[in-house]
Image (spheres, grey):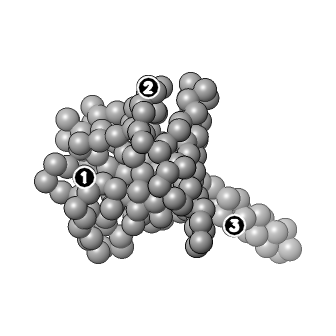
Amino acid sequence: MRCWWIALLMSTLLVGCATPSRTAKSFSTEQANMPEWQGRISVQVLGDTPSSMSASFLLRGDAKNGELDLYSPLGTTLGALQWTPQLVQLSDGGKHQYFNSLAELTEKATGAALPVEAIFGWLQGQQVNIRGWQADLSSVSQGSLFARRTEPAPEVTLRIKLDQ
């Protein structure tokens, strides 16, 4: 009987350590052919009230039409960002918030307005210049991206580690 309890405890612990599978979305043929990146993202905002955000992510599309899903370490969806020329929204637990720009959307979701168009270029190894931001692309081929915004204040750091 004691061995049974130990086996039950061990299997419960192992299940708790497993990476949960994310719910598969159904995509149109056009969406299925869009570029896609998956991994971890971290955004740190320095200044008077420092903040940081870290999550697993799935990024699909481009700067004009795209989706960014953010996940907790347990695999629950923290937020689903979606943008088209007609719509910029954040879905969070069944609630939808609408925004005027991608900068407003990313600031709400991550704590900082992120240069989404540049991020798509950086992930593809392209040196995209954006005012106030410097990107280190030396490790992009190994799946790591680091970028930093120094102007305007506050300073923001962005780290992306892609699943290989």
Q: Position of residue 65 (x, y in %)?
A: 23, 44
The residue carrying mark 3 is: 12
**Vertically, is 109 above or below 135?**
below
| Residue 119 quadrant | top left
| Residue closest to the eye, 94 or 67 | 67
Going from the N terminus, do you reach mark 1 or mark 3 first?
A: 3
Q: Position of residue 113 (x, y in %)?
A: 41, 57
Question: Residue shown at 44%/25% (left/top)?
Answer: 126
> Mark 1 and mark 2: span between their CA atoms?
22 Å
SS label for mark 1: strand
**Residue at the right extreme, as displayed:** 2
Quarter of the picture containing the C terminus is top right
| Residue closest to the eye, 120 or 18 | 120
Say which amino acid is labelled 2. Gln
| Residue closest to the eye, 127 or 2 | 127
Question: Residue shown at 72%/65% (left/top)?
Answer: 13
> Mark 3 and mark 2: span between their CA atoms?
45 Å
The residue carrying mark 1 is: 83
